[in-house]
Amino acid sequence: MKLLITGGAGFIGSAVVRLAVDRGHEVVNVDALTYAACLDNVASVSDSPLYAFEQVDIRNRDALDAVFSKHKPDAVMHLAAESHVDRSIDGPGDFVETNITGTFNMLEAARKYWIEADKPDTFRFHHISTDEVFGSLPNDPAVKFTEDTPYDPRSPYSASKASSDHLVRAWHETYGLPVVLTNCSNNYGPFHFPEKLVPVIILNALAGKELPIYGDGANIRDWLYVEDHADALLLVVEKGVLGRSYNIGGENERTNLELVRTLCAILDKKRPKASGSYTDQITFVTDRPGHDARYAIDPTRIREELGWQPSVTVEEGLEKTVEWYLSNEAWWSALQQRHGVGERLGVKA
Protein backbone atom coordinates (compact mmCIF):
# COMPACT_ATOMS: atom_id res chain seq x y z
CA MET A 1 0.00 0.00 0.00
CA LYS A 2 1.24 3.51 -0.81
CA LEU A 3 0.45 5.86 2.05
CA LEU A 4 0.44 9.65 1.87
CA ILE A 5 1.14 10.69 5.47
CA THR A 6 0.80 14.35 6.43
CA GLY A 7 2.81 15.59 9.39
CA GLY A 8 5.22 12.71 9.04
CA ALA A 9 8.12 14.67 10.53
CA GLY A 10 6.19 15.30 13.73
CA PHE A 11 5.94 13.15 16.84
CA ILE A 12 3.07 10.76 16.07
CA GLY A 13 3.43 11.09 12.31
CA SER A 14 7.07 10.03 12.36
CA ALA A 15 6.21 6.96 14.42
CA VAL A 16 3.67 6.02 11.75
CA VAL A 17 6.18 6.65 8.96
CA ARG A 18 8.84 4.49 10.60
CA LEU A 19 6.47 1.62 11.30
CA ALA A 20 4.83 1.77 7.85
CA VAL A 21 8.17 1.60 6.04
CA ASP A 22 9.36 -1.18 8.34
CA ARG A 23 6.25 -3.15 7.38
CA GLY A 24 6.87 -2.73 3.66
CA HIS A 25 4.48 0.09 2.81
CA GLU A 26 5.48 2.86 0.44
CA VAL A 27 5.31 6.19 2.25
CA VAL A 28 5.09 9.75 1.01
CA ASN A 29 5.82 12.06 3.93
CA VAL A 30 4.17 15.47 3.44
CA ASP A 31 5.29 18.02 6.02
CA ALA A 32 5.74 21.79 6.06
CA LEU A 33 8.60 21.46 8.58
CA THR A 34 7.21 24.01 11.00
CA TYR A 35 8.69 24.53 14.47
CA ALA A 36 7.72 21.12 15.95
CA ALA A 37 8.83 19.03 12.97
CA CYS A 38 12.20 17.35 12.64
CA LEU A 39 13.42 15.17 9.78
CA ASP A 40 15.79 13.44 12.19
CA ASN A 41 12.64 11.71 13.46
CA VAL A 42 12.53 9.64 10.26
CA ALA A 43 16.26 9.33 9.63
CA SER A 44 16.12 5.57 10.23
CA VAL A 45 13.98 5.08 7.11
CA SER A 46 14.87 8.11 4.98
CA ASP A 47 17.25 6.14 2.76
CA SER A 48 14.70 3.43 2.05
CA PRO A 49 13.43 3.12 -1.55
CA LEU A 50 9.97 2.95 0.01
CA TYR A 51 10.24 6.50 1.41
CA ALA A 52 9.70 9.87 -0.25
CA PHE A 53 9.49 13.36 1.25
CA GLU A 54 7.58 16.41 0.05
CA GLN A 55 7.96 19.71 1.92
CA VAL A 56 4.44 21.03 1.46
CA ASP A 57 2.14 23.09 3.68
CA ILE A 58 -1.40 21.69 3.81
CA ARG A 59 -2.67 25.27 3.58
CA ASN A 60 -1.36 25.29 -0.02
CA ARG A 61 -4.03 23.57 -2.11
CA ASP A 62 -2.15 23.73 -5.43
CA ALA A 63 0.89 22.06 -3.89
CA LEU A 64 -1.31 19.31 -2.44
CA ASP A 65 -2.89 18.65 -5.85
CA ALA A 66 0.60 18.28 -7.30
CA VAL A 67 1.61 15.78 -4.60
CA PHE A 68 -1.47 13.63 -5.21
CA SER A 69 -0.92 13.73 -8.96
CA LYS A 70 2.75 12.83 -8.66
CA HIS A 71 2.55 10.03 -6.07
CA LYS A 72 -0.95 8.54 -6.59
CA PRO A 73 -1.42 7.16 -3.06
CA ASP A 74 -3.69 4.28 -2.11
CA ALA A 75 -4.59 5.95 1.17
CA VAL A 76 -4.12 9.16 3.12
CA MET A 77 -3.23 9.34 6.80
CA HIS A 78 -3.82 12.93 7.84
CA LEU A 79 -1.88 13.81 10.99
CA ALA A 80 -0.56 17.30 10.18
CA ALA A 81 -1.84 19.71 12.81
CA GLU A 82 -0.93 22.35 15.32
CA SER A 83 -1.23 20.41 18.56
CA HIS A 84 0.04 22.24 21.65
CA VAL A 85 -2.87 23.49 23.77
CA ASP A 86 -0.84 26.25 25.43
CA ARG A 87 0.22 27.63 22.04
CA SER A 88 -3.41 27.58 20.91
CA ILE A 89 -4.31 29.85 23.81
CA ASP A 90 -1.66 32.38 22.80
CA GLY A 91 -2.16 32.10 19.02
CA PRO A 92 -5.45 30.47 17.99
CA GLY A 93 -5.24 31.73 14.40
CA ASP A 94 -2.54 29.24 13.43
CA PHE A 95 -4.72 26.42 14.72
CA VAL A 96 -7.73 27.55 12.69
CA GLU A 97 -5.66 27.92 9.52
CA THR A 98 -3.81 24.59 9.77
CA ASN A 99 -6.27 22.31 11.53
CA ILE A 100 -9.48 23.52 9.89
CA THR A 101 -8.54 25.14 6.57
CA GLY A 102 -5.67 22.70 6.08
CA THR A 103 -7.98 19.73 6.60
CA PHE A 104 -10.47 21.26 4.14
CA ASN A 105 -7.67 21.50 1.57
CA MET A 106 -6.66 17.89 2.21
CA LEU A 107 -10.24 16.69 1.79
CA GLU A 108 -10.71 18.59 -1.45
CA ALA A 109 -7.37 17.48 -2.88
CA ALA A 110 -8.13 13.88 -1.93
CA ARG A 111 -11.64 14.10 -3.37
CA LYS A 112 -10.36 15.51 -6.68
CA TYR A 113 -7.73 12.78 -6.91
CA TRP A 114 -10.26 10.06 -5.97
CA ILE A 115 -12.76 11.20 -8.61
CA GLU A 116 -10.12 11.47 -11.32
CA ALA A 117 -8.99 7.92 -10.44
CA ASP A 118 -12.59 6.70 -11.01
CA LYS A 119 -13.32 6.39 -7.28
CA PRO A 120 -11.31 3.24 -6.47
CA ASP A 121 -12.94 1.08 -3.80
CA THR A 122 -9.64 0.64 -1.99
CA PHE A 123 -8.95 4.34 -1.41
CA ARG A 124 -9.09 5.59 2.19
CA PHE A 125 -8.81 8.99 3.87
CA HIS A 126 -7.84 8.38 7.49
CA HIS A 127 -8.24 11.43 9.71
CA ILE A 128 -6.31 11.28 12.99
CA SER A 129 -7.75 13.33 15.85
CA THR A 130 -7.76 13.63 19.64
CA ASP A 131 -9.92 12.76 22.62
CA GLU A 132 -9.83 16.43 23.61
CA VAL A 133 -12.73 17.08 21.22
CA PHE A 134 -14.99 15.37 23.79
CA GLY A 135 -14.27 17.87 26.56
CA SER A 136 -13.82 16.83 30.18
CA LEU A 137 -14.93 13.81 32.21
CA PRO A 138 -15.89 13.51 35.88
CA ASN A 139 -13.53 11.65 38.20
CA ASP A 140 -15.47 8.40 37.86
CA PRO A 141 -13.65 5.34 36.46
CA ALA A 142 -16.93 4.02 35.06
CA VAL A 143 -17.31 7.01 32.73
CA LYS A 144 -15.11 7.13 29.63
CA PHE A 145 -15.17 8.60 26.16
CA THR A 146 -16.79 6.39 23.53
CA GLU A 147 -17.22 7.02 19.83
CA ASP A 148 -20.74 8.29 20.62
CA THR A 149 -19.71 10.84 23.26
CA PRO A 150 -20.99 14.30 22.25
CA TYR A 151 -18.33 16.82 21.28
CA ASP A 152 -17.58 19.52 23.86
CA PRO A 153 -14.20 21.14 23.06
CA ARG A 154 -12.81 23.57 25.65
CA SER A 155 -9.66 25.05 24.06
CA PRO A 156 -8.84 26.62 20.69
CA TYR A 157 -6.82 23.49 19.90
CA SER A 158 -9.62 21.03 20.67
CA ALA A 159 -12.19 23.24 18.94
CA SER A 160 -10.08 23.27 15.79
CA LYS A 161 -9.72 19.49 15.87
CA ALA A 162 -13.45 19.05 16.49
CA SER A 163 -14.11 21.25 13.46
CA SER A 164 -11.81 19.15 11.30
CA ASP A 165 -13.54 15.94 12.48
CA HIS A 166 -16.89 17.38 11.44
CA LEU A 167 -15.52 18.35 8.03
CA VAL A 168 -14.28 14.80 7.42
CA ARG A 169 -17.64 13.30 8.33
CA ALA A 170 -19.42 15.83 6.13
CA TRP A 171 -17.23 14.97 3.11
CA HIS A 172 -18.11 11.32 3.64
CA GLU A 173 -21.85 11.95 3.92
CA THR A 174 -22.10 14.61 1.20
CA TYR A 175 -19.56 13.47 -1.37
CA GLY A 176 -19.11 9.81 -0.51
CA LEU A 177 -15.39 10.22 0.19
CA PRO A 178 -14.25 6.96 1.82
CA VAL A 179 -13.05 8.00 5.26
CA VAL A 180 -12.16 6.52 8.63
CA LEU A 181 -11.47 8.52 11.79
CA THR A 182 -9.59 7.93 15.02
CA ASN A 183 -9.48 9.84 18.29
CA CYS A 184 -6.58 9.09 20.62
CA SER A 185 -5.60 9.73 24.21
CA ASN A 186 -2.38 11.45 25.32
CA ASN A 187 0.66 10.11 23.48
CA TYR A 188 4.19 9.87 24.85
CA GLY A 189 7.41 8.16 23.82
CA PRO A 190 10.59 8.67 21.75
CA PHE A 191 10.89 11.81 19.60
CA HIS A 192 8.27 13.70 21.65
CA PHE A 193 8.83 17.42 21.02
CA PRO A 194 10.31 18.96 24.20
CA GLU A 195 7.46 21.31 25.06
CA LYS A 196 4.99 18.60 26.13
CA LEU A 197 4.63 17.33 29.70
CA VAL A 198 6.66 14.11 29.63
CA PRO A 199 9.77 15.51 27.89
CA VAL A 200 9.53 18.75 29.89
CA ILE A 201 9.70 16.79 33.13
CA ILE A 202 12.56 14.57 31.96
CA LEU A 203 14.67 17.41 30.58
CA ASN A 204 13.99 19.85 33.43
CA ALA A 205 14.88 17.13 35.92
CA LEU A 206 18.19 16.48 34.21
CA ALA A 207 18.93 20.22 34.09
CA GLY A 208 18.17 20.69 37.78
CA LYS A 209 15.20 22.94 37.02
CA GLU A 210 11.75 23.05 38.58
CA LEU A 211 9.29 20.38 37.47
CA PRO A 212 6.15 22.44 36.79
CA ILE A 213 2.76 20.87 37.47
CA TYR A 214 -0.39 22.82 36.64
CA GLY A 215 -2.79 23.43 39.53
CA ASP A 216 -2.72 20.66 42.11
CA GLY A 217 -1.69 17.93 39.66
CA ALA A 218 -5.02 16.13 39.96
CA ASN A 219 -5.89 16.34 36.25
CA ILE A 220 -6.14 12.82 34.83
CA ARG A 221 -4.98 11.62 31.42
CA ASP A 222 -5.06 8.25 29.68
CA TRP A 223 -1.49 7.67 28.46
CA LEU A 224 -0.81 5.92 25.14
CA TYR A 225 2.69 4.87 24.04
CA VAL A 226 3.26 6.39 20.60
CA GLU A 227 4.43 3.15 18.98
CA ASP A 228 1.25 1.41 20.16
CA HIS A 229 -0.71 4.28 18.62
CA ALA A 230 1.13 3.94 15.29
CA ASP A 231 0.28 0.24 15.23
CA ALA A 232 -3.40 1.02 15.81
CA LEU A 233 -3.45 3.70 13.11
CA LEU A 234 -2.06 1.36 10.46
CA LEU A 235 -4.62 -1.25 11.47
CA VAL A 236 -7.48 1.24 11.07
CA VAL A 237 -6.35 2.48 7.65
CA GLU A 238 -6.08 -1.13 6.46
CA LYS A 239 -9.17 -2.67 8.05
CA GLY A 240 -11.39 0.06 9.51
CA VAL A 241 -15.01 0.24 8.37
CA LEU A 242 -15.70 3.19 6.08
CA GLY A 243 -17.40 6.12 7.78
CA ARG A 244 -16.58 4.70 11.19
CA SER A 245 -14.56 6.23 14.00
CA TYR A 246 -12.34 4.38 16.47
CA ASN A 247 -11.17 5.58 19.87
CA ILE A 248 -7.58 4.60 20.65
CA GLY A 249 -6.53 4.65 24.30
CA GLY A 250 -3.70 3.29 26.37
CA GLU A 251 -5.98 2.21 29.26
CA ASN A 252 -3.40 3.83 31.54
CA GLU A 253 -5.09 6.60 33.53
CA ARG A 254 -2.83 8.60 35.82
CA THR A 255 -3.03 12.00 37.45
CA ASN A 256 -0.40 14.43 36.26
CA LEU A 257 1.20 14.30 39.70
CA GLU A 258 1.33 10.48 39.63
CA LEU A 259 2.89 10.58 36.18
CA VAL A 260 5.57 13.06 37.25
CA ARG A 261 6.40 11.05 40.36
CA THR A 262 6.76 7.92 38.22
CA LEU A 263 9.17 9.73 35.92
CA CYS A 264 11.15 10.96 38.90
CA ALA A 265 11.41 7.42 40.30
CA ILE A 266 12.70 6.12 36.95
CA LEU A 267 15.25 8.93 36.76
CA ASP A 268 16.30 8.31 40.36
CA LYS A 269 17.17 4.78 39.30
CA LYS A 270 18.74 5.47 35.90
CA ARG A 271 20.48 8.85 36.49
CA PRO A 272 20.58 9.37 40.28
CA LYS A 273 21.29 12.81 41.70
CA ALA A 274 24.21 13.41 44.03
CA SER A 275 21.70 13.78 46.84
CA GLY A 276 17.94 13.62 47.22
CA SER A 277 15.31 12.72 44.65
CA TYR A 278 14.09 14.42 41.51
CA THR A 279 10.74 14.75 43.28
CA ASP A 280 12.37 17.55 45.30
CA GLN A 281 12.16 19.66 42.12
CA ILE A 282 8.36 19.37 41.77
CA THR A 283 6.70 22.80 41.76
CA PHE A 284 2.99 23.58 41.44
CA VAL A 285 2.23 26.48 39.08
CA THR A 286 -0.88 28.44 38.12
CA ASP A 287 -3.26 26.21 36.21
CA ARG A 288 -3.81 26.42 32.46
CA PRO A 289 -6.98 28.34 31.47
CA GLY A 290 -9.80 25.90 30.67
CA HIS A 291 -7.77 22.89 31.82
CA ASP A 292 -9.92 19.75 31.36
CA ALA A 293 -10.14 17.64 34.50
CA ARG A 294 -9.99 14.15 33.04
CA TYR A 295 -9.69 12.27 29.74
CA ALA A 296 -10.21 8.53 29.46
CA ILE A 297 -10.82 6.40 26.38
CA ASP A 298 -13.04 3.35 26.12
CA PRO A 299 -11.27 1.33 23.37
CA THR A 300 -13.88 -1.44 23.21
CA ARG A 301 -14.72 -0.86 19.54
CA ILE A 302 -11.18 -1.11 18.18
CA ARG A 303 -10.44 -4.07 20.43
CA GLU A 304 -13.56 -6.04 19.48
CA GLU A 305 -13.78 -5.10 15.80
CA LEU A 306 -10.10 -4.94 14.83
CA GLY A 307 -8.36 -6.88 17.59
CA TRP A 308 -6.08 -4.06 18.78
CA GLN A 309 -4.94 -3.42 22.34
CA PRO A 310 -1.99 -1.55 23.87
CA SER A 311 1.19 -3.56 24.41
CA VAL A 312 2.77 -1.71 27.35
CA THR A 313 1.73 -0.25 30.69
CA VAL A 314 2.48 3.39 31.32
CA GLU A 315 5.29 2.42 33.70
CA GLU A 316 6.92 0.26 31.01
CA GLY A 317 6.44 2.92 28.35
CA LEU A 318 7.81 5.70 30.53
CA GLU A 319 10.92 3.66 31.30
CA LYS A 320 11.51 3.16 27.57
CA THR A 321 10.95 6.88 27.04
CA VAL A 322 13.39 7.96 29.75
CA GLU A 323 16.04 5.59 28.37
CA TRP A 324 15.54 7.08 24.90
CA TYR A 325 15.96 10.68 26.12
CA LEU A 326 19.04 9.76 28.13
CA SER A 327 20.58 8.28 24.98
CA ASN A 328 19.58 11.04 22.53
CA GLU A 329 20.73 14.35 23.97
CA ALA A 330 21.90 15.61 20.57
CA TRP A 331 18.32 15.33 19.27
CA TRP A 332 16.55 17.16 22.07
CA SER A 333 19.19 19.76 22.87
CA ALA A 334 18.94 21.14 19.33
CA LEU A 335 15.16 21.39 19.53
CA GLN A 336 15.29 23.23 22.85
CA GLN A 337 16.69 26.22 20.94
CA ARG A 338 13.48 26.70 18.95
CA HIS A 339 11.07 29.55 19.66
CA GLY A 340 8.99 29.17 22.81
CA VAL A 341 10.43 25.83 23.89
CA GLY A 342 11.07 25.86 27.61
CA GLU A 343 8.90 28.93 28.18
CA ARG A 344 5.55 28.91 29.97
CA LEU A 345 2.95 29.51 27.26
CA GLY A 346 -0.82 29.77 27.34
CA VAL A 347 -1.19 32.28 30.15
CA LYS A 348 -2.70 35.18 28.17
CA ALA A 349 -6.34 34.20 28.65
Image: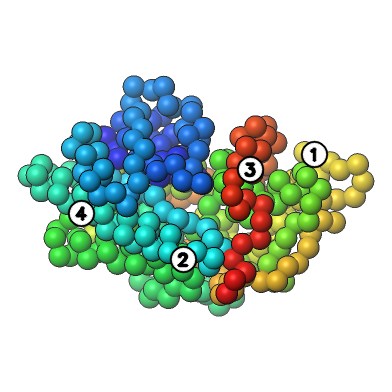
**Residue sitting at x 67%, y 34%:** 329
Give the image's coloring scheme.
Answer: rainbow
Residue 92's tag is: 2
In the image, 142 versus 38, the foreground residue is: 38
Q: Which residue is mark 4?
A: 108
Mark pair 2, 4: CA separation: 23 Å
- Cα distance between the residues tagged 4 and 3: 36 Å
Disc 1 crowd, CA 10 A, few/some/many (<14, 14-19, 20+): some
Specify whether 156 is left or right of 217: left
Residue 337 badge = 3
| Residue at image location 41% in from the left, 22% down from the top | 47
Residue receiving disc 1: 271
Q: Position of residue 339 (x, y in %)?
A: 59, 49
Mark 2 or mark 1, which is nearer the start of the sequence? Answer: 2
Q: Earlier in the sequence, mark 1 or mark 4?
A: 4
Type of amino acid under label 4: Glu
Q: Residue type at mark 2?
A: Pro
